[in-house]
Image (cartoon, rainbow, N blue to C red):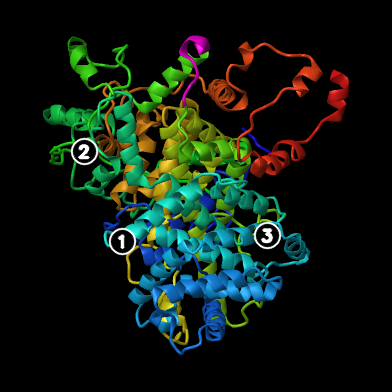
């Protein structure tokens, strides 16, 4: 699993708040009293004093329209809004004779002017071409100089983007983007500079901004859209999804930009804009979460499977957040259980005590975690062992003592409890061939048990794949629908490991727990100004801008990876497993755990924004003079939407990677993820808590009976919020030594199945094994082949990818012949 190219996250700042300003290094001798006391004091200050209210957060494909547009621009770019406006007005005055403004023109006149702009894009002069591109960007930004409000700016931005697309602007900018990607002079210039700044990516930023605005505005569906706009949207979706002439799907071009950036060959690429555009293109072409649910229902119907009992996201929206664990007690005072003599004196309430401790049907709705104890000395040492395991095995984490959440202070309390009115999820059963783990009475109810059996689409796909491998002749040729998801997977297939490693490298560099390293990639090229700040106020503004820039990168990567996994899983389970395995091999699991090894509540409530500088607000009013107070004010929301969105996406991603995978679940156990995950329960948001509890559930039987006994409130929360599997022994099983952690064997078996699937479907022509072979050279060369009509369009691209780009081992060829 150690990939030499795989990223490895650096350790967190010692103060645990993710800003890198801590003075402690957390590298003292394990078990040293001074280091432990300092850590406990620090934990009390950073977590014990924070009381998180319930966060009113609605999960979705993306944030609001204005917020998604504003995140395209860094605050350093704000001066360019004026430049774009000036370039448009200069060109507009020379081309339109009367004194009308853009919004006063008839639609035909507007189309005529846009056609003229596209003609002027083809000039040889690079400087003149940039001015015309800025004029187009001003149109895509909503011609804000003629608007009176933010609503007007957003309205005309959408109107202009549809107009620009209908006139062929996207195709014209795509050609310019190809030219800039292949511009070796710009790459060489950036490589020679000691520090790359925003000035090195001016042309690319203008092109990507226009394309992003067009994708985001056209992607947005509204009931008032005209038939022409609806038709244009579907045409645009098809254009981005499928190959046209010699062009590959647009998403593959953006993936190639990501890998080129991470390889160090193009450090000037504005990677935030590339990632945002890539995420939105994938969402637009493949579909968001609601479309995924509709596709899943449709596919289950086609396979003859019963309909889904519920929509997971809709169920989560109706759930309430649980109260977080309490960290206000001194973690240094270990409160031990009462001696046996005192327990023997409580015979009168023995039945109630056993019921409270052992039955998972009891749920204290007032506070799930309020009676949990502080951590014991043994648990603290166990957590430190987990840190050392991460350090030694993956070289990912620097030592930073982890204190597991406190176990139950009074596990035998007789507080009054309330039974839940109903569980949110319909129960499922995966296996009805065995009754292991079920109580005796259920042996008489096998028929009822089978009625709850859940057969997934993946189960059918795996069975079909096994049949195709066994009986290729009798089953015939497999018919593979050419869906956008299938076409994207085919295009990504041979470079997919590089794509995943590149995305994780960028995610590592943007994580708040990462420290700057000399060999890490620079993701700040499109946010750093040419001249560094010279005043404290300028430094504060740039600091906010940099933090915001990193948060947006984390948001885009987490959402992109989650969308890819969900779509590939629905398209075919082995496509999903192929992507998942390369993420695991690239150390994605410890990277996500490292991300959560911080004060996650502080990250979610961070205020790295300056509302007066956000688009479109900054375009319709004169920018006020910034002061320290205005910079620190931020907005009035109780949390940062993008950061909470990112955290939920990363937790969902971690669930996708580890679900039903014993070896990967053991990675969570070995890396001591339970204390890290339990601290995330401090965030009172139902969806985030659900995915944390899911990750805790899958490893409870490996944590031991003592852990479950000390964390009964967490166990109750799992029981009340997470779906039940009727024959799952998560609550009472003890598999600590029952099964060996044979990571390599399990992953190798899965990899063999994946390679067999990819080889059968993509590597060879159908029926090639059973066709006679013609060994006569003259006969083979004399055969007439029927080539597709568009072969001459893609021939050069095929030669470049399959012939010229493939390394040839001449020594091996000579030895074999």
Q: Are marks 2 and 3 in contact (CB under 8 Å)?
A: no
Task: Specify whether residue 426 is in view.
Answer: yes
Q: Nearer the viewer, residue 473 or 450?
A: 473
Q: Is residue 174 left or right of residue 780?
A: left
Q: Which residues are magenta?
A: 470-479
Q: Where residue 350 appears, x then y in whole percent?
A: 15, 28
Is 89 included in the stretch rendered in magenta? Answer: no
Q: Which residue is mark 1?
A: 225
Which quadrant is home to the N terminus?
A: top right
C-alpha gap between disc 2 and disc 1: 37 Å
**Vertical placement of residue 47 versus 794, above or below:** below
Dot 2 crowding, Cα within 10 Å, few <14, some 14–19, many 20+ = some
Q: Where residue 739 appears, x then y in whole percent?
A: 47, 18
Checking the image for residue 424, the label placed there is 2
Dot 3 crowding, Cα within 10 Å, few <14, some 14–19, many 20+ = few
Question: Which residue is pictured at 53% across the width and 37% down the height?
Answer: 489
Question: Which residue is pictured at 40% across the width and 80% down the height?
Answer: 103
Q: Which residue is mark 3?
A: 179
Residue 354, quarter of picture: top left
Residue 297, quarter of picture: top left
Q: Where residue 464 appears, x then y in whole percent?
A: 43, 18
Q: Nearer the viewer, residue 189 or 8?
A: 189
Q: Nearer the viewer, residue 279 or 263?
A: 279
* Local secondary structure at mark 3: helix
Q: Decide which of tag 2 and tag 1 comes sooner along the chain.
A: 1
Tell me the mark number nearer the camera, choosing from 2 and 3.
3
**Which residue is most to the bottom?**
99
* Local secondary structure at mark 1: loop
Q: Is residue 641 left or right of residue 173?
A: left
Tell me the mark number nearer the camera, choosing from 3 and 1.
1
């Amino acid at each position: 699993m150690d990939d030499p190219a795989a990223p490895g996250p650096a350790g967190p700042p010692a103060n645990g708040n993710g800003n890198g300003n801590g003075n402690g290094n957390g590298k003292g001798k394990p078990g040293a009293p001074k280091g432990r006391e300092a850590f406990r004091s620090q934990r009390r200050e950073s977590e014990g004093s924070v009381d998180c209210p319930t966060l009113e957060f609605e999960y979705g494909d993306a944030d609001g329209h204005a917020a998604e547009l504003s995140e395209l621009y860094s605050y350093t770019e704000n001066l360019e809004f004026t430049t774009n406006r000036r370039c448009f007005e200069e060109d507009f005055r020379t081309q339109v004779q009367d004194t009308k403004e853009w919004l006063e023109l008839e639609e035909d006149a507007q189309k005529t002017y846009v056609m003229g702009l596209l003609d002027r894009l083809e000039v040889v002069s690079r400087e003149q071409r940039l001015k015309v591109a800025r004029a187009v960007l001003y149109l895509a930004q909503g011609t804000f100089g003629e608007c009176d409000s933010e609503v007007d700016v957003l309205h005309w931005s959408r109107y202009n983007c549809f107009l620009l697309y209908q006139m062929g602007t996207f195709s014209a900018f795509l050609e310019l983007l190809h030219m800039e990607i292949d511009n070796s002079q710009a790459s060489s210039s950036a490589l020679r500079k000691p520090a790359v700044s925003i000035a090195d990516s001016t042309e690319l930023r203008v092109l990507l901004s226009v394309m992003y605005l067009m994708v985001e505005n056209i992607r947005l569906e509204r009931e008032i859209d005209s038939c022409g706009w609806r038709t244009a949207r579907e045409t645009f979706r098809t254009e981005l999804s499928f190959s046209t002439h010699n062009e590959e799907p647009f998403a593959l071009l953006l993936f190639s930009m990501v890998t080129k950036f991470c390889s160090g060959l193009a450090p000037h690429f504005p990677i935030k804009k590339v990632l945002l555009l890539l995420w939105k293109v994938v969402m637009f072409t493949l579909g968001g979460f609601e479309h995924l649910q509709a596709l899943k229902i449709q596919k289950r119907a086609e396979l003859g499977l019963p309909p889904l009992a519920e929509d997971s996201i809709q169920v989560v929206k109706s759930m309430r957040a649980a109260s977080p664990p309490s960290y206000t007690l001194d973690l240094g005072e270990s409160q031990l259980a009462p001696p046996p003599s005192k327990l023997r004196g409580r015979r009168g309430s023995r039945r109630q005590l056993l019921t409270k401790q052992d039955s998972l049907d009891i749920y204290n709705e007032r506070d799930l975690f309020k009676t949990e104890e502080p951590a014991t000395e043994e648990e603290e040492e166990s957590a430190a062992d987990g840190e050392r395991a991460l350090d030694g095995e993956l070289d990912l984490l620097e030592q930073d003592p982890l204190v597991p959440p406190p176990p139950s202070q009074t596990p035998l309390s007789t507080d009054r409890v309330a039974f839940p009115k109903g569980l949110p999820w319909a129960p499922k059963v995966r296996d009805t061939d065995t009754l292991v783990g079920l109580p005796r009475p259920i042996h008489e109810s096998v028929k009822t048990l089978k009625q709850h059996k859940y057969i997934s689409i993946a189960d059918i796909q795996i069975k079909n794949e096994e049949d195709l491998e066994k009986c290729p002749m009798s089953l015939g040729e497999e018919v593979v629908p050419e869906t956008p998801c299938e076409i994207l997977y085919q295009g990504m297939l041979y470079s997919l490991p590089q794509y995943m490693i590149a995305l994780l490298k960028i995610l590592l560099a943007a994580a708040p727990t990462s420290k700057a390293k000399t060999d890490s990639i620079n993701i700040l090229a499109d946010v750093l100004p040419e001249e560094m700040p010279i005043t404290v106020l300028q430094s504060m503004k740039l600091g906010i801008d940099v933090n915001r820039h990193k948060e947006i990168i984390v948001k885009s990567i987490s959402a992109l990876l989650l969308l890819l996994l969900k779509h590939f899983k629905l398209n075919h389970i082995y496509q999903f497993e192929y992507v998942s395995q390369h993420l695991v091999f690239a150390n994605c699991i410890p990277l996500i755990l490292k991300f959560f090894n911080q004060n996650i509540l502080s990250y979610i409530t961070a205020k790295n924004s300056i509302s007066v500088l956000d688009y479109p607000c900054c375009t319709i009013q004169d920018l006020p003079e910034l002061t320290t107070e205005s910079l620190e004010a931020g907005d009035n929301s109780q949390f940062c939407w993008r950061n909470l969105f990112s955290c939920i996406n990363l937790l969902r991603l971690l669930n996708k990677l580890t679900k039903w995978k014993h070896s990967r679940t053991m990675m969570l156990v070995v890396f001591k993820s339970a204390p890290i995950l339990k601290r995330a329960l401090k965030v009172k948001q139902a969806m985030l808590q659900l995915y944390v509890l899911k990750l805790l559930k899958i490893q409870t039987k490996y944590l031991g009976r003592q852990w479950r006994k000390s964390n009964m409130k967490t166990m109750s929360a799992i029981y009340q919020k997470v779906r039940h599997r009727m024959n799952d022994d998560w609550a009472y099983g003890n598999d600590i030594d029952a099964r060996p952690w044979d990571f390599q064997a399990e992953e190798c078996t899965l990899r063999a199945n994946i390679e067999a699937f990819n080889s059968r479907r993509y590597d060879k022509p159908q029926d090639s094994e059973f066709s006679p072979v013609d060994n006569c050279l003259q006969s083979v060369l004399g055969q007439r082949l029927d080539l597709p009509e568009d072969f001459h369009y893609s021939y050069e691209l095929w030669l470049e990818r399959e012939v010229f780009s493939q390394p040839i081992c001449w020594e091996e060829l000579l030895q074999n012949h």
